[in-house]
Image (spheres, grey):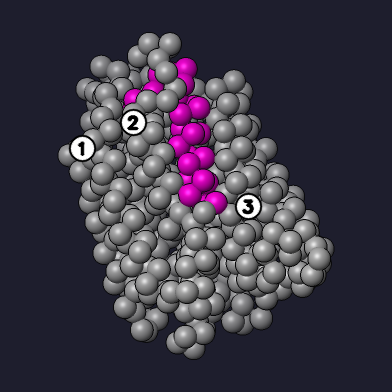
Amino acid sequence: MDRSAPLFTPVLIAGCIIIMVSFAVRASFGVFQIPIAEEFGWLRSEFSLAIAIQNLAWGIGQPIFGAIAEKIGDRKAIVMGAIVYAAGLVLSAWSTTPFEMQAYEWLVGFGIAGTGFGVVLAVVGRASSDENRSMSLAVVTAAGSAGQIFGAPAAEWMLGFLSWQSVFLIFAGVVLALILTLPLMRAPEGASKAELEESMGAILMKAFKDPSYTLIFLGFFSCGYQLGFITAHFPAFVTEMCGPILPGGALHAIGITTTSALGAAAISLIGAANVGGTLLAGYLGKRYSKKYLLAAIYTGRTIAAAAFILFPVTPLSVIVFSVAMGSLWLATVPLTSGLVAHIYGLRYMGTLYGIVFFSHQLGSFLGVWLGGRMYDTYGDYTMVWWIGVAVGAFSAIVHLPVKERPLPPAALAA
């Protein structure tokens, strides 16, 4: 593709819309933690397990939908994902027991996979020029953060006058509307002739034997752990653990008068900060080593999480942490997906990145579930935070030995 090709294309715009809506709904689930638990008298761990299952299903479904997209077409995969996503939300709205909620979150998780990064980033990657690819992936990832900006506050606002069941039904309708964007999702093949001649099985086998692929897989685990835990539990954590919002202060003046509202706003603030952080990561990704950038991001996350839990939780510390963590939130995604595309090519990027993303979702499952479990056992989240600090440090280290160079088709077919 011509290096002078524009950055913003119909495929990129449609991809941004799909990711934005998908992530807006997904990022709002932490807001429902307390309302659902209070209505039914559930333990914190029971709804946490439902969200954890959602994340696990997302991880399992990501390589599946990536393979579906590569076999029968990207748009058909997205249609399937949107339908499954909406069905899961509708059924979840009528759940009255923890088992029902946990069962239906499998559908929600698979739906997120069909409308999420694995499928959409692969389409955008193929539709982008070599010069624009890193930035294009960053723009789509930043769109996910944009969804996070309004997803949690919108849910919190609607819960002020609607039941949580009604909010779920509204979200289901919004997800189904994503199908209207699909006429724009037309991408060229984007792979070299040599890549097109290689089978999926051959490339997967060689990737699995490559130590760098294993290191990338392991390194993405902590990203999922930290993001999953914070998305699911941070609103409740802030609601219960943060110091009071004093009348006459800046937060009170803009309408944030309760810690519950601050918890929802914190998720939004994380998303807002991440728009800039992700775009910066994409810009730097085409100029500097992606593995070193990833190591730096995980180091920054480790420091931010450790500092936050060491000091008293106040409205100011919540805001500072949200901005710091938000600037690093999804910055790993364009770098990790770009690294996979750089080393292993574009032909099966959706499947290869989907498998790496499964590690991310294993981390999400553990972070979400362990958060609820530890809360029910000890009455706070301290131990879960420190585990997140440890796995973040691990990811910072594990990316350093990655060999950041393309594997030639001959090597893949050997």
For the residue pair 224 and 164, the one nearer the viewer reads as 164
Residue depicted at x 30% and y 59%: 173
Circle 2 residues within 10 Å: few <14, some 14–19, many ≥20: many
Residue matched to label 1: 73
Going from N to C along the chain, the mark reached first, 3 or 1, is 1
> For the N terminus, which image quadrant?
top left
Residue 349 visible, this orientation: no
Image location (x, y in percent) of residue 393: 67, 49
Residue 11 bears which disc, if any?
Answer: 2
Please give the range of residues in magenta. Answer: 126-149
The Cα atoms of the two marked residues, 1 and 2, are separated by 14 Å
Report whether 394 appears left or right of 31: right
Tell me the kind of residue under disc 3: Leu
Left or right for 147, reference 300: left
Q: Amino acid at mark 2?
A: Val
Mark 3, residue position:
269
> Which residue lies at the image location 49% right of the left edge and 22% below the top edge?
405
